[in-house]
Image (spheres, rainbow, N blue to C red):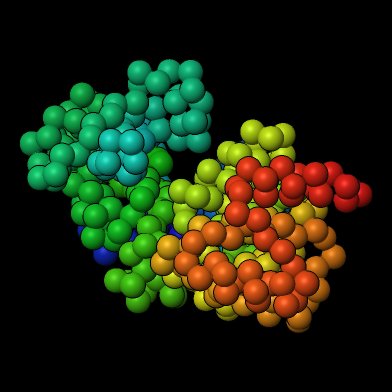
């Protein structure tokens, strides 16, 4: 789950990371009132879960409540990378002497949190990573955790003064604690700024939470923004399905992440293009199968659907019942190919046969068949 900046700053503040005061507004009038309560120079920032807000005009300074009203009005009218701006953060502005970059991300390949820091923070950090990767220092955190002396060693070469390096190290340690206790897959501060007075503060927050840990965090229900989800993504989350939309035209409903990936690879191998990754899980039920079909048929670019079920814990008859139940309610307007093998496959075949459907046991045959049927459907 991606957090908005203001939510990420709320998480950071819980762990003692210094952030500037601010509040979120949904209307220009609210922004004006917040600005009046903060006083001084303020920064008005679009709250969308996309990068490049500054370059898109989504970050502006305001020197008075009336100017905050105008800036918020203009930003709330924007659409940034296809996402309409529904909220703005009105925060105290800071004088910046130097910008740095500091982040911790889960490195899946190394199976360890990865610290990334750089003296080249700010809006062009992606360009720095592309053109001058040597300017980004990386360190994998071992199982025993991030030690204070290691944090100091990492920060000392970046900062010209020891006091600033000590502040940076303290923030890095707190960021690590937020990353671990907050069950994050990414915790990023960009920029990590030094003020002319030498104070080190977090001016931005980008946080991605690991959905697998949601059962440990009741507060995540308040942080989730339904407006940032597509209807398909929302239904998948509510029904416990793993779903990722892709650009192809062959819808995939599969049990198990590994088989899902193999199915997409095989579709590509035979010249097709998968429209999605959709894993109904290892213990599916008819309701999940019905939801899966609702999700896929809601995507207008899908020209054929493939069910690829290898029954272990998953019962093939459950899947077959879900298919029949869904088709009775909402008949498909596009071809459907079914591959079933494993637990209760005989029962499943009978359920499908009684409804006028058939199923193959060959994965290769099913993939070739669904590609042929997709090509027969007009674009």
Relative to 327, 57 lies left or right: left
Q: Measured from the top left, where is residue 281 in percent x and y?
A: 47, 64
How many numbered marks, from 0 up? 0
Along the line of sight, which residue is nearer the eye, 73 or 312? Answer: 312
Residue 355, by quadrant, is bottom right
Residue 101, by quadrant, is top left
Relative to 195, 59 lies left or right: right
Along the line of sight, which residue is nearer the eye, 163 or 210? Answer: 210
Task: Inspect this view and state whether residue 83 appears.
Answer: no
Relative to 138, 65 lies left or right: right
Residue 300, by quadrant, is bottom right
Q: Report the residue at 60% width, 47% height from top.
A: 363
Q: Measured from the top left, where is residue 16 in percent x and y?
A: 22, 58
Q: Is residue 94 above or below residue 283?
A: above
Q: Report the residue at 15% width, 39% height from top.
A: 142
Q: Report the residue at 80% width, 44% height from top.
A: 372
Q: Report the residue at 29% width, 71% height from top.
A: 216
Q: Measured from the top left, where is residue 221 in percent x and y?
A: 43, 75
Q: Measured from the top left, where is residue 254 in percent x and y?
A: 56, 57
Q: Is residue 118 above or below residue 53?
A: above
Q: Residue pushed farthest right?
A: 378
Task: Inspect this view and state whether residue 350 appears.
Answer: yes
């Amino acid at each position: 789950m991606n957090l908005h900046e203001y939510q990420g700053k709320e998480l950071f503040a819980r762990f003692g990371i210094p952030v500037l005061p601010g509040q979120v507004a949904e209307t220009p009038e609210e922004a004006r009132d917040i600005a009046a309560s903060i006083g001084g120079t303020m920064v008005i920032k679009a709250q969308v879960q996309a990068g490049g807000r500054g370059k898109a005009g989504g970050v502006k300074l305001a020197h008075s409540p009336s100017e905050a009203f105008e800036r918020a009005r203009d930003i709330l009218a924007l659409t940034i990378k296809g996402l309409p701006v529904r909220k703005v953060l009105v925060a105290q502005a800071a004088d910046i002497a130097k910008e740095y970059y500091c982040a911790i991300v889960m490195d899946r390949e190394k199976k360890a949190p990865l610290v990334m820091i750089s003296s080249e923070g700010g809006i062009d950090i992606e360009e720095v990573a592309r053109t001058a990767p040597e300017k980004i220092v990386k360190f994998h955190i071992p199982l025993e955790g991030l030690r204070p002396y290691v944090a100091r060693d990492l920060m000392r070469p970046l900062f010209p003064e020891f006091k600033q390096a000590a502040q940076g190290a303290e923030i890095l340690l707190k960021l690590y604690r937020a990353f671990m206790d907050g069950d994050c897959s990414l915790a990023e501060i960009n920029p990590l700024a030094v003020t002319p007075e030498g104070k080190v503060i977090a001016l931005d927050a980008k946080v991605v939470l690991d959905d697998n840990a949601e059962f440990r965090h009741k507060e995540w229900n308040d942080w989730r923004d339904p407006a940032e989800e597509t209807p398909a993504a929302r239904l998948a989350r509510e029904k416990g399905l793993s779903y990722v939309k892709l650009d192809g035209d062959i819808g995939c409903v599969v049990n198990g992440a590994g088989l899902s990936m193999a199915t997409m690879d095989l579709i590509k191998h035979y010249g097709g293009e998968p429209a999605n990754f959709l894993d109904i899980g290892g213990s599916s039920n008819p309701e999940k199968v019905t939801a899966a079909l609702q999700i896929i048929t809601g995507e207008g670019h899908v020209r054929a659907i493939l069910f690829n079920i290898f029954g272990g814990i998953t019962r093939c008859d459950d899947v077959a019942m879900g298919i029949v139940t869904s088709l009775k309610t909402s008949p498909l307007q596009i071809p459907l190919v079914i591959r079933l093998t494993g637990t209760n496959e005989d029962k499943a075949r009978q359920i499908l046969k009684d409804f006028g459907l058939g199923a193959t046991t060959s994965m290769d045959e099913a993939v070739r068949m669904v590609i042929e049927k997709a090509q027969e459907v007009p674009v």
